[in-house]
Each structure stands twice: as C-alpha cells, then as structure tokens.
Image: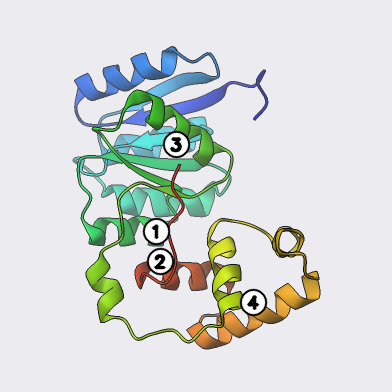
Amino acid sequence: MDEKKQVRVLLADDHRIVREGMKLILESVPKYKVVSEAANGDELMHKALLLSPDLIVSDLKMPGNPVFDSCKKLKEQLPEMKIMILTAFDESEDIYQALEAGIDGYIMKDTMPEQILSTMEMVYMGYSCYQPKISKQRKQDSKQLELTEREQEIFQLIVENLSNQEIAEKLYITEATVKTHVSSILRKTGQPNRSQAVLFAIKNGYVKVPTS
C-alpha cells in the first residue's frame, strides 16, 4: 500500500454509536479517511455510487435495501472498490451470501481494533479475509471431491488470490503445468471459471478460507 495515499472509507451501520466507534479507530491511523457515513442500505448504495470510496465497511443487518443486494450491485458497477462486512452475525448462510455477493472481507464486531485494522488493510490490498469459520456440517454433507494432492495445493492457492504465474513460482513448476491442473480442477468441480470454482469449494468446505 502506498503510504502517501489515503484510503477513502465509507462507514455503514444503523447504530450511530458503532459508526462513531469505528471512526475513532480509523482516525487513529493516518492512512484512512472516512469520507461519509450511511445508516441504512439505501444510503449505502447512494453514497457509494456518489463518492466511489476505496473501501466500504458495512454492517450486515440494516433497514432499507438488503446489504447483500447493495453490495452485489456495487461490485458489478465498481469492481475495484473493496467491501468488508463488520457484523455481530456469523451464521453460515450469511457467509455464503457474502461470498456470492463478491464481498471481500467478513469480520465480527467484537474483534480487537488492531485486528479490524489489519483485516481492512488485507482487504484493501486485494485479499479475501473471512473471520468466521465455514460450517463443518456443510463439509461433512458434501460429496468428496477427488483431487490429487497437487490439485488440492493449487486450489488452495487459487483461493488465496494467487495468479497462475505466482502459483508456478511458489511451487517451482511451470505456468503451463499450473494451467493444466487448473483445467482439471474446473472439470472435476464442474465450474466454468476460477471464481465459481473458488465459491463452490468454500461453500462445500474443500479449502480453507483465508483470514488475516
């Protein structure tokens, strides 16, 4: 991250005290600048489109337009913008919906301020950071995916946002070999691309969700 560039943040929560608390945390770090606040899903959508912040930190359950719907639309219109959910809810279905909406981070409100800031930085840098654990029951109920040890290793690195070239360098293999394994992974999972394969794997518990 460029130390000289301030990260423009939009805070969204229907409780003013939560917004004020988060603002205090962010103001303790020069690199973050709170450009606006939203108290419901409609304000979140309007202000995000108006201001195009670098990062949105939003509550999950707010009045107005559902947060997941707003985030999905925002990701379609402003794909470079990062979104992190700060919530008191860690239900598996909420996490799955967050993944499907393209949300970059998901962290609990009772997290220590230092970890919240660390997660925000990871999200801004392009990493997917989900604090709650995916339901183990979903994994137990899933059909076993027959991947080779190398495919499992590569699949995990794909989830961690590594490119084919980065995976090749990390595993000391050629990029062509990585592409072959990726093609095999897509075939075995029945998914059309890397993004859908990652979502499929996370929802079924085949890989670990990266955390900060």
Give the number of the disc on residue 202.
Answer: 2
Q: Residue at x 42, y 57 (%)?
A: 209
**Secondary structure under badge 4?**
helix
Three-letter code for the amino acid on which mark 2 is drawn: Ile
Q: Position of residue 131 (x, y in %)?
A: 35, 46
**Secondary structure under badge 2?**
helix
Q: Which residue is mark 3?
A: 119
Q: Earlier in the sequence, mark 1 or mark 4?
A: 1
Q: Position of residue 117 (x, y in %)?
A: 43, 28
Mark 3 crowdedness (10 Å alpha carbons): few <14, some 14-19, many ≥20: many
**Secondary structure under badge 1?**
helix
Taking depth in this image into account, of 148 and 63 the one nearest to the observer is 148
Three-letter code for the amino acid on which mark 3 is drawn: Thr
58 on left or right of 118: left
Q: Which residue is mark 4?
A: 182
Q: Position of residue 25 (x, y in %)?
A: 37, 18
In what quadrant of the picture does the C terminus appear?
top left
Three-letter code for the amino acid on which mark 4 is drawn: Val
Circles 3, 1 touching at the beta carbon (< 8 Å): no
Q: Earlier in the sequence, mark 2 or mark 4?
A: 4
> Could you tell me how far apart the alpha carbons at marks 3 and 1 are, in whole angstroms?
16 Å
Q: Earlier in the sequence, mark 2 or mark 1?
A: 1
Give the number of the disc on residue 45.
Answer: none
Three-letter code for the amino acid on which mark 1 is drawn: Leu
Circles 2, 1 touching at the beta carbon (< 8 Å): yes
Mark 4 crowdedness (10 Å alpha carbons): few <14, some 14-19, many ≥20: many
